[in-house]
Image: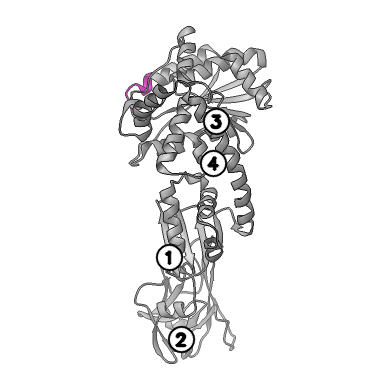
Amino acid sequence: MEKHLVSFFKKHNLILENKTIAIAVSTGVDSMALLACMNNLKTDFNLKIHIVHVNHGKRKESLIEEEYIKDYAKANNLDIHIMHLEANNEVNFQSYAREKRYDFFYKVIRQVKADYLMLAHHANDNMETIMMRLIRGSSLKGYSGMIEVNQADGFYILRPFLNILKDELIDYINLHKIKYYEDISNDDDLYTRNRIRKDLIPIIFNEDANAHLKFIEFANTINEAAKIVEEKVAVTIKDYEFSNNSISFSASKFLEESDYLKEEILFTLLKKYDLSKANIFEIIKLIKSKKKNLKVEFKKRFTIVKEYDKITIFNYLLEIQDFRVIIDEIKTYNINDTIQIIVSKTGCNYIPSKEDLWYNSNMLPVVMRRRIPGDKILLEGGYKKVKDLLIDLKLGILERDNVLILEKDSEVLAVIGIRKSVKLKNIENNDIIINVRSKYNG
């Protein structure tokens, strides 16, 4: 097995000597086999090995397993990093746990400056992954399952056992009398992967003892085809607007693409969320919607906003902070990171810009707040709903959500930066300026 690992590094032109390696270890057969093999190579290749272990806290045996891997690390002079997974109410615990595990792995990698993260997924695991994705739907690349080498941000993720059956790892473990623990939750029929492992994989191997080789061939074929599709997607999205927190693009141009390319574009843009094909279809339906303005918190993970022809996907839940501030003296009011109200004395007799409000200090207090349903403002032609005013101006939903209202005794005096009430314009002896500095922090 050690020879296989050395060959794996040579096959992928990866340097093994003098490297720092993080190994994810659950104490199961596969991860203990990987750890034991790499530990045997440690001296010959001058390796710095860090064990990374996550205690999910779902089984009473978890503490026993944690103590075992601690003892193993100490006996073999290996560094170890342990995380205890916080309790949660997620319906899909496996998905939640996977996300938290990888967050922890990457944190350790950055901390120890590891060159490689090694994972012990084997051929059986990959067969299960491919079948799961066929059932739930995936991107083209997703149908190929896991890959042996994946370049991440400053390090590589390695899965050297993907072409090896679990039985071979069990034989290795038994031969070298390496202690390991079985996770009884792997037999729980609640999870799709477990049902595939227990019910479908044995049937496939009954048909062909070398079925895993056919899955490897399938994965390689799909991977090559995916490269062609990825090139097409890259060309298509080159005009999209990317920022640290969001992606924006034209709905009409997106909808001009073929149905298949639409799916692949969204799988690419939203790769980090590991969405199913049903999720992708749901997002396409939102983009196709005849509603000109939409804001959807998708699966409580990210926000999709449609403003006429513009689609923006924010990588967080977009929450608008509500507030109600009483302005009763001349000073600066810091509302939050994006809104500041400056009230200052002025001796000017000119009308300020539409963003500034000229007011009489003797008529304080006034209130600055968010827009609420039913707001009306008195214009030259009579009262008009603020909502209708914003629609007439074709303001997008984000701009509407962030509109500020100045009111006095429940009367709207101004929609800040947009329109001022006739009542505000008729006020005399103005001696202060109310200036609102506001921007949407996207």
Instruction: Give the mark nearer the N terminus: 4 vs 1.
Output: 4
**In the displayed structure image, the side of residue 386 where residue 164 appears, left or right:** right
**In the displayed structure image, the side of residue 242 where residue 73 appears, left or right:** left
The x and y percentages for residue 106 are 55, 35
Quadrant for the C terminus, please: bottom right
| Image quadrant where residue 95 sits | top left
Q: Which residue is mark 3?
A: 217
* Distance between mark 4 and mark 3 Cα atoms: 14 Å
Instruction: Give the mark nearer the N terminus: 3 vs 2.
Output: 3
**In the displayed structure image, the side of residue 390 where residue 254 appears, left or right:** right
Q: Is residue 412 magenta?
A: no
Q: Residue at x 50, y 57 (%)?
A: 313
Task: Name the front one of labels 4 and 3.
Answer: 3
Give the amino acid at mark 3. Glu
Q: Is label 4 in contact with label 1 (beta carbons under 8 Å)? A: no
Q: Which residues are magenta?
A: 59-64
Give the amino acid at mark 4. Lys
Give the amino acid at mark 2. Leu
Q: Is label 3 in contact with label 2 (beta carbons under 8 Å)? A: no
Instruction: Give the mark nearer the N terminus: 4 vs 3.
Output: 4
Instruction: Give the mark nearer the N terminus: 1 vs 2.
Output: 1
- Compared with residue 263, is residue 406 higher up or lower down, i.e. above or below? below
Q: Which residue is mark 1?
A: 289
Q: Which residue is mark 4?
A: 141
Give the amino acid at mark 1. Ser
